[in-house]
Structures are given as C-alpha cells and as structure tokens.
Image (cartoon, rainbow, N blue to C red):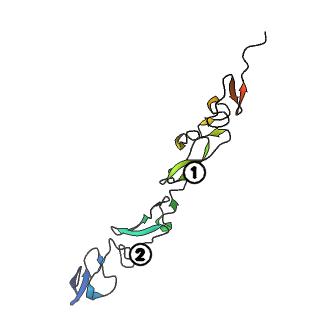
C-alpha cells in the first residue's frame, strides 16, 4: 500500500487508500501518500490547494487551513490574506507599531518612526519643549513666560509673554 496508506478491496481489486490527513499528491503510488495535507502550503487540506503568500508575507498551512506569516515589520491589518501583509507598522501613522494604533499628539502633526509615535511638527504657536511625544507640543509659546516665543526663553521680571514676545507689565495708575 505504501507510506501513510492502506489497501481496500473494491469489486475484487485491491485499491490503495490514503490514511486520513494524507494525500498522494504527486500521483506516484510507489511512494504512497507522501503529503501531509494539514501542513503543506502546496497541498493545504487537499492535493493541489496552494496557499497564497501575498506581498510581505510567507504562506502557511496549519490544520489544513491557509494563512500567512508577516515578514518582520509588516502586519496584515485588513485581515485579507490575499493581499498579504500590507502595512509597514514601523512608519504608518494609522498603524504605528501594530494594527489600529493611530498616532495622535496634542497640538501637533503626528508621525510614526521606528514603530513609535513622534511629533512631526507643532502647530503654529506651540512647541515640544520636553521632547516627549506622549504629551505632544505641550507649550503655548504665545503666552507662557517661561517659554516665550521659544523653548527656554524666559521673560525678565516686570515683563510678561504676549503674542510670543516679552512685554512690559504696566502696574498701578498715574499719580
């Protein structure tokens, strides 16, 4: 009967029959039922049923079901194996570091770099003085005396930050 096969009698003739989970996919009876259908990407579940790989992906077959394994740095965010692993999660602001992780930072245009959300640029009048993307562009350069017009530019005593410049503060009235 061969490897992974048995024989049964049909109308008085011995006929080879593959054991469950195996197939004679090469058509050569001398080597029996050589293909394990539960794990073969060329014959997944049945002879001739090839698993597609898609871009940035490697085809897989597990328990007779086709799937994909993404290449490093890529993910299958839309769940469609046919188009492979379509997102490079190291630079995608919509899927930064993983599917569905959207970059959003306060008062800034966000970007994804190295699978981490970063500040690409600050909105006009705002600055990222601490360099942390987690709180975005946290400083209002137009009204903060410790960072007036630029990070670390402190207004002197008797002045206050107004529209990004240090201006004299008028105290008291004329006598």
| Foreground: disc 2 or disc 1 | 1
Quickly name the residue at label 2.
50
Where disc 2 sits, the SS reads loop
Q: Quadrant of residue 9?
A: bottom left
* Residue at point 37%, 76% (across, down): 43
Position of residue 99 measured from the top left corner of the image (x, y, whole percent): 48, 54
* Residue at point 53%, 53% (across, down): 113
Quickly name the residue at label 1.
111
Q: Is residue 97 above or below residue 71?
A: above
Position of residue 24 measured from the top left corner of the image (x, y, whole percent): 31, 82
Dot label at residue 132: none
Position of residue 156 measured from the top left corner of the image (x, y, whole percent): 66, 26
Look at the image and tell me in which quarter the N terminus lies: bottom left
Outermost residue on the front side: it is 156
Observer-nearest of 97 and 76:
97
Where disc 1 sits, the SS reads strand
Q: Quadrant of residue 138?
A: top right
Q: Is residue 168 above or below residue 109?
A: above
């Amino acid at each position: 009967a061969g490897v992974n096969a048995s024989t049964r009698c049909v109308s008085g003739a011995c006929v080879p029959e593959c054991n469950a989970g195996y197939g004679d996919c090469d058509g050569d009876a001398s080597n029996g039922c050589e293909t394990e259908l539960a794990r073969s990407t060329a014959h997944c579940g049945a002879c001739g049923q090839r698993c597609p790989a898609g871009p940035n992906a490697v085809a897989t077959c597990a328990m007779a079901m086709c799937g994909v394994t993404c290449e490093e740095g890529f993910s299958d965010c839309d769940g469609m194996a046919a188009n492979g692993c379509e997102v490079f999660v190291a630079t995608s602001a919509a899927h930064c570091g993983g599917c569905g992780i959207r970059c959003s930072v306060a008062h800034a245009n966000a970007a994804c770099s190295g699978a981490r959300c970063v500040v690409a640029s600050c909105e006009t009048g705002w600055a990222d003085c601490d360099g942390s993307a987690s709180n975005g562009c946290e400083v209002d350069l137009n009204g903060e005396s410790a960072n007036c017009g630029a990070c670390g530019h402190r207004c002197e005593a008797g002045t206050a930050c107004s529209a990004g410049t240090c201006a004299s503060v008028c105290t008291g009235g004329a006598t």
